[in-house]
Image: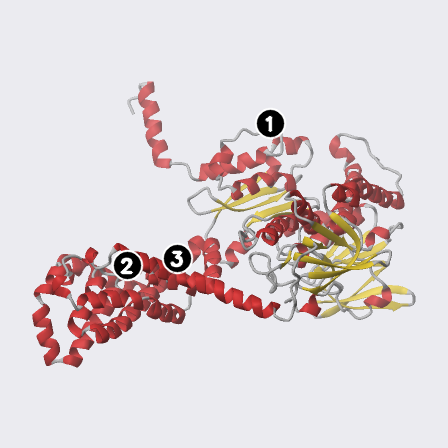
Amino acid sequence: MSMRKLLLLLIFVLVGTAYVAFDLGQYLSLAGLKAQQSAIESYRLANPLLAVVIYCLIYVMVTALSLPGAALMTLAGGAIFGFWWGTLIVSFASSIGAALAFLASRFLLRDWVTARFGERLRAIDDGVQREGAFYLFTLRLVPVFPFFLVNLLLGLTAMKATTFYWVSQIGMLAGTAVYVNAGTQLGGIESLSGIVSPGLLFSFALLGVFPLVAKKIVAAVRSNQIYAKWPKPRRFDRNLIVIGGGSAGLVTAYIAAAVKAKVTLIEKHRLGGDCLNTGCVPSKALIRSAKFLSHQQRAEEFGMRRPASTDFSFAEVMERVQKVIKTIEPHDSVERYTALGVDVIEGTAKIVSPWQVDVTRHDGATERLSTRSIVIAAGARPFVPPIPGLEEVGYLTSDTVWALRELPRRLIVLGGGPIGTELTQAFARFGAQVTQVEMAARILIREDPEVSKLVTQRFRAEGIAVLTNHRAKQFVVNHGEKILIAEHAGSDVRIPFDAVLVAVGRVANLTGYGLEGIGVTVSRTVTTNPFLQTNYPNIYAAGDVAGPFQFTHTAAHQAWYATVNALFDPFKKFKADYSVIPWATFVEPEVARVGLNEQEAKEQGIAYEVSRYNIDDLDRAIADSEAHGFIKVLTVPGKDRILGVTIVGEHAGDLIAEYVLAMKHGIGLNKILGTIHIYPTLAEANQYVAGVWKKAHAPEQLLVWVGRFHAWRRGDAT
């Protein structure tokens, strides 16, 4: 703690001690005020300006130090200065004192609270920045809520001091006037509780609702403004139109049909979106075949004689990938969703007004549909950076790589994120000479450095060239050979290749279906509020097109909120909850995470403890010859509440589910430790890491006494 904080804290302690020791509260009591009223009045008449200054200083000090007596000081203002001057003086003195208490709380406690409750405080700060002025105004209008608590608690948030001051100045005016007016009749007051009658309290409660009503009115006015140029249909053909048949769109349509809404789903390519056709499903099918080959390379680990090999055709492997897609395809088919009650249209959509969508079917037929609400679920596509020469040499993406039937001899993978990393290892295991090029200092940059290190070590052991800190500058063709020129440590590195796979991220699909025509606000994604509404309240967005997470399971999660809000607003709507979002990268060693990791906790200044269990000690992992990796759990210091979990190892994506459940429902490590896990399984590792936490928090002093108890029971003299 700094010297300035210590000094301020010392002042608070000394004033509080003096207040109690010298019974200063007697001067801030109703009886004391009545007894001194005539003397105070005489002094005011003799020294009017000085009386105002002294009164203001005392009032500011009482309020700033959160001492009891602010209500009495307000009464005194009415008794000494009359209603009009008293209201004016008290209004400024109380607001200045409140602002000082606010600043003192921030100065003394904000850093400590941020360090201890950073994640929760950020959510509160976001809400305060959006709606803090409204809620502060409401609290100020209701005098039954202790004002000193408002001062101290809001000082811990990110609210601007200027906002706090002017809202307090206006919000406290009504209550100030009531107490000042009572002070003008001081002789007739017997107790403070008699000042505010039940009727008056009810009036204040109605006043407290005013900011919320005002907010609704402002929202309605803004809504009318944005809808002003669009004629609203008198009736609607649909309750909901969904644009895009990927994960978000399918779940949206499913939920809408389940609650008996009339819903139309429009998809211009294939239902199932990227996940089924070019993403999750084909990549995992490819990874599974590659993993089988890798096990053959490890035959001796499983007690088999070398050499162990399989004759395979890469074309047949890719045909298997397509068979897997075809097998899963009925889950996302037109027939299935039509049977569920969804009107599925295969064609293109264009939003022409907030309530109308033009549809062009694949057979050329067109129609215009009206709808109460629209959900945009248009997904995303691979980002292709503008690197000179890339178009000329040709490139693959995660969308087009599935058309390959011949394995590239030399493959460059641009990008060290999850997609690039998964495909890097898979192609290498089929026999391609793979070079992974990443401009950052390490691959899987969102994970902790030790995670990146483990994966990189495994890649290099499998013959993959992992080139970090390499920035792709240019592609050239020299004497018929394709070459990537990359910059590394200030020098150019030339990397020859036969094919290049671009996997440097994905961008939202924002054009081609009318957003620009009606003025839907976009940035890198469709801009939405916490309810997933765009600037048009009846148009929503979900999935990759909305962000902030580009995962299939997050898209489905958002779809629930978008659907329920679209169908039931204004009666009820829900803010999308991103508090517990898991993900996995399906390489070997597999990586899974939920919540914070260490690098994020450090960046955000969140205090944490680490409990770690190395899976190489786990019986089942040893039996499976997969004794590698670890589980790392971040918890609140001194408590078993989980802040985040990182798992590296076999089936990490499956093992993480226990922690997702625990974090979602507030289950701590103590309860995980007390849960029976089947032996021998990989899931036992979750119980063991909980045991690591428990051992670190064992009650050592209690155990000393327990040891003495057992010694006494044995009859030992000691």
Left/right placement of residue 239 relative to residue 414 reads: left
Task: Determine whether 80 is above or below 110 in the image.
Answer: below
Left/right placement of residue 118 relative to residue 568 reads: left
Q: Which residue is mark 1?
A: 679
Label at residue 112: 3
Q: Residue at x 66, y 65 (%)?
A: 524
Determine crowd level at label 3: few under 14, some 14-19, many 20+ residues with C-alpha closer than 10 A: some
Q: Residue at x 25, y 63 (%)?
A: 65
Nearer-the-camera pick, 526 or 696:
526
Label at residue 401: none
Q: Earlier in the sequence, mark 3 or mark 2?
A: 3
Q: Which residue is mark 2?
A: 200
Nearer-the-camera pick, 185 or 519:
185
The Cα–Cα distance between marks 3 and 2, rounded to whole angstroms, is 40 Å
Whether residue 489 can be seen here: no
Q: Amino acid at mark 3?
A: Trp
Residues at discs 1 and 2 in contact (Cβ within 8 Å): no
Q: Earlier in the sequence, mark 1 or mark 3?
A: 3
Q: Mark 1: which secondary structure?
A: loop
Q: Amino acid at mark 1?
A: Tyr
Query: Quadrant location of the N terminus?
Result: bottom left
Image depth: mark 1 or mark 2 in front: 2
Q: Earlier in the sequence, mark 1 or mark 2?
A: 2
In this view, the residue farthest toward the front is 234
Q: Mark 2: which secondary structure?
A: helix
